[in-house]
Image (cartoon, rainbow, N blue to C red):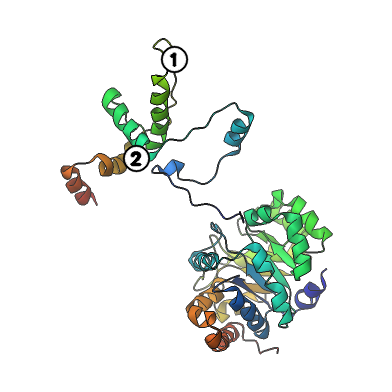
Amino acid sequence: MNKRFQQSIENGKRPLFIPFITAGDPSGEATVDIAVTLQEAGANAIEIGIPYSDPLADGKVIQAASGRALDGGMTLKKAMELVPEMRKKGVEIPIIVFTYYNLLLQLGEDQFFQLAEDCGVDGLLVPDLPFEESEDLFMTAKSFNLPLISLVAPTTSSERLKKIVSNAAGFVYCVSSLGVTGVREGEFKPEVYEFLAEVKKYSRVPVAVGFGISSAGQIEKLRNHCDGVIVGSAIVREISNLENELRNRDSRSQALERLKEYLLSLTGRTMTI
Amino acid sequence: EDGQITEPYSISAGLDYPGVGPEHASLHDSGRVEYRSVTDNEALEAVSRLSKKEGILPAVESAHAVAEALKEAAKMSTDENLVICLSGRGDKDVHTLMERFGSERDEQTLSTVD
């Protein structure tokens, strides 16, 4: 397993906290500083979402973030080139690229992995590539020692779940509920806990749950059923509220402080740095 | 060029889509099928002509084929045959047609319907 993954994820304090942000929202420069803040707030890894014209797995919040990032000219390549900037500013936790398949196809899979190696990217997740179509990509990723993270959902059949989960690399991303990304208020359905138990049964890597997580209460309820949580829309929503302040270099540190307060209220962690 | 999907356009919903299925892609590449384009206006005119002449209301999507067929037929002799696949009905398109061909009376009808 990749060293950063080993340190922060395999050996990371439970529940793991894995935030998702859209690269280039509101700007590439802001994304680099946001990554530093995420680490300071206790993130075990960061998912960098690549903006796409047709984000079919995403709800309003991430769709809007994608739009803003695309307007600013963000691309898969440019997003990956932000990672060395993050590393220079002290970000040591694993960085996972979250991209829809067509962007990866256009860049070229081999080019992607070479760039990942050069830029210090530690993992890849492709939400619209079904497991059955992913074997080649999985093997290429393996040859570069970079995990291709698998997604499973409550709708995944037990047969497929067993197959996907027992072959999973990095961690298993469990989609908490039916539908697209987006904040969900209130409790998760009881079926989620059964689903997570099933995944934990077969997984040899940590199990993380995502989609809809937006409150400390939800995290508290989930923590004994999984190894960690992925939080996307709730954070992206907070970033969109701070859009103008984050864009501007003069107001950015203040905005980042407010973002950090929000993250700490969500996870209840103390600052690591 | 980065893989973002280009915004497509067509007046007909069925054709307002940026992708091409693998069967069509293969038929095009092998040369077995020739693909041509038709404008919104040509398609709508074809809806009008077919409706008035034959009493058949085609879907706007299907009317694209009618428009092209009419052009093709003009080059053919009367003892040659031409077949059109009329893929669907135009009931679903009446609002589009009212907007295009409608009169003042239709404007009133449109505003009271909702």
Say above or below: A225 vs B21: below
Residue found 21% across the figure and 51% down from its top: B111
Nearer the observer, B25 or A9: B25
Please report whichever mark, 2 or 1, sits nearer to the chain's N-terminal start.
Answer: 1
Badge 2 amino acid: Lys
Provide the chain ID for the residue under circle 2: B
User: Residue A92 — which label?
Assistant: none
Quadrant of res A1: bottom right
Residue found 55% across the figure and 78% down from its top: A215
Nearer the observer, B14 or A170: B14
Residue found 59% across the figure and 26% down from its top: B32
Residue B14: x and y in percent read 44, 41
The residue where tag 2 is placed is B92
Provide the chain ID for the residue under circle 1: B
Q: Is residue A221 visible?
A: no
| Left or right: B103 as drawn, with respect to A236 | left
Give the CA separation, mark 2 to mark 1: 30 Å
Q: How many marks?
A: 2
The residue where tag 1 is placed is B81
| Left or right: A234 as drawn, with respect to B59 | right
| Left or right: A150 as drawn, with respect to A187 | right
Residue A168: x and y in percent read 76, 61
Quadrant of res A56: bottom right
Q: Farthest residue to the top: give it.
A: B79
Residue found 80% across the figure and 77% down from its top: A7
Quadrant of res A156: bottom right
Residue B96: x and y in percent read 31, 43
Nearer the observer, A104 or A129: A104
Badge 1 amino acid: Asn
